[in-house]
Amino acid sequence: MPSAPKTTSAATAALPAPSEPAGGGARSRRNRRLRAPDRYWVRLTAALAVLAALVRVPSFLRPVWNPDEGYLAVQARMLAHGGVLYDTVVDRKPPLLPWLYEGLFAVFGDDSLWPPRAAAVVAQLATALLLASVARRRWGGRAGAAAGAGYLLLSIGLAPEDTQAASFGVFMLPWTALAFWAADRRRWGPAGLAVAGAALTKQTGGAVLLPVLWMLWSARRAPEPPGRAAALRLLAGCVLPVAAVAILTGPSRFVFWTVTGSGSYASASGAWGVALGRGLGNAGILAAAGAAFIVPAVLAAARGGGAGRLTADLWVWLGASALGVVFGFQFYGHYFLQLIPPLVLIGVGALRGLPRWWPAAIAWTVLASAAFAVWGLTAPRTELDHADAVAAAVRARTGPGETVLVWGMHPEQYWLSGRAPASRYLTAGFLTNFSGGRGGARVGERYAVPGAWRTFGEEAALRPADLIVDDSRGAPYAPALTPTLRRMLDTGYRPVDTVGGAVLYARLPAPR
């Protein structure tokens, strides 16, 4: 007969614990302090920290990865020298990352981007640990470790300029993972704060509000359903930080630069082919890198959620992230980073029902990550070499106190040259609506940010640039296609040098 289940009587429970051997008290106390769950997290955190550093080694091997890093570096310098965000320092992005760059530069100096890149390693580690916590709570310790490691390996599964840069997408992800983690534990106030943090890092980060709302709505069927107070805590967490930042930066300016002033930029009118081609290309790259998660996820969806292992909140998170990718119809590779956290969780949950797939899934993910790391180590430096050459020419023809206008889409030239911008508009895109995501569609002065040319003229009249660099190199925003800039060059400047297709114009002496 089967043995009876073990029970603990009240008398047995009241018995004192066995006495400890001499000298064992301290060891026992240490063991109690470091319980099994603690040991799990200590070991996992250490392992994931090493992995996070390894996959981001390429990040530290070149001065700038993409124009977003260059833009943030120049913004931070301008803010440190008295610039005002959304006034004399402008961008279409929320303020948290420019402020982070400014703070890191203040502490560590602004001659290198290693501080924000080190912060990016921490951000990726935080995201991995939050995903591991969600997976462990739902499916156990092995799933938690797989989710954390799987996320870090897949986090570089796009072109290196999209994954290795310390840019908006990377710093948005810890906030989105924290929002989901908090909602999963019914901590609605912190979930709202995390949603606000995501949106204040990058607008599309606010899409994580959808799965959070879904989880709040689904919790009404719980034994202790959340009441109106929970919804109010979530709402306050979302709204109050955004309102505080808006008041700090100026409500009208904040709304204009982060929401209403980007209508033309967010449109793919006239360039649907370019946008869709880029979107399909980047989706294909991520699909190849994440096949070990995507294939089980597809099978789980076909089977109706993986026999209960996958709940609807994960699918809602993935769908909301897809909306974030689509928003703006630009489809740059770093937009797809938003898909990775929910995709990894869904894939790990689905693999729970496919035990024989684990070795193949691990092998594929490790090999794919290694391939992308090699790509990062060997990626061409063509644009970086051009920016370095232009920056060297700018330094040679200007002094430290002189200002420069770079007419192009590579603001890192300001940072590399160590010269201050002559305008708050750090790329020609603000004045012509040019974007690589659309090619040459809807480009010209009439598509500029509203009021930009008037402000640009005022800046030029107050303090004209000592040197103008025409780095258009045949792009549809070239001076020949931009009459206002052409007149400025014709009447006040003369060409003095050419570097890799970029033309440098020196200011003419003022008439006597």
Image (tube, rainbow, N blue to C red):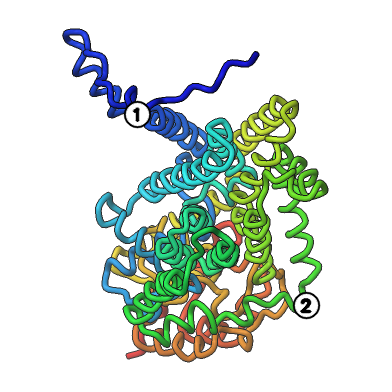
Specify the label residue 10 is tagged with: 1
Mark 2 lies on residue? 270
Q: Residue at x 32, y 69 (%)?
A: 79
Determine whether the residue tagged by mark 2 lies in a helix, strand or loop.
loop
- Of badges 2 and 1, nearer the viewer stands 1
Specify the label residue 387 is tagged with: none
Work out whether residue 295 or residue 142 is closer to the camera in this orientation and state it.
142
Residue 509 higher or lower than 38, as above or below: below
Label 1 CA crowd tier, 10 Å (few <14, some 14–19, many 20+): few
Work out whether residue 235 or residue 336 is closer to the camera in this orientation and state it.
235
Say whether residue 362 is left or right of residue 7: right
Mark toward the start of the polypeptide (2 vs 1): 1
Furthest residue toward top? 22
Examine the rendering and report whether any part of residue 377 can be seen.
Answer: no
Quarter of the figure with the N terminus: top right
Q: Amino acid at mark 2?
A: Gly
Furthest residue toward left? 22
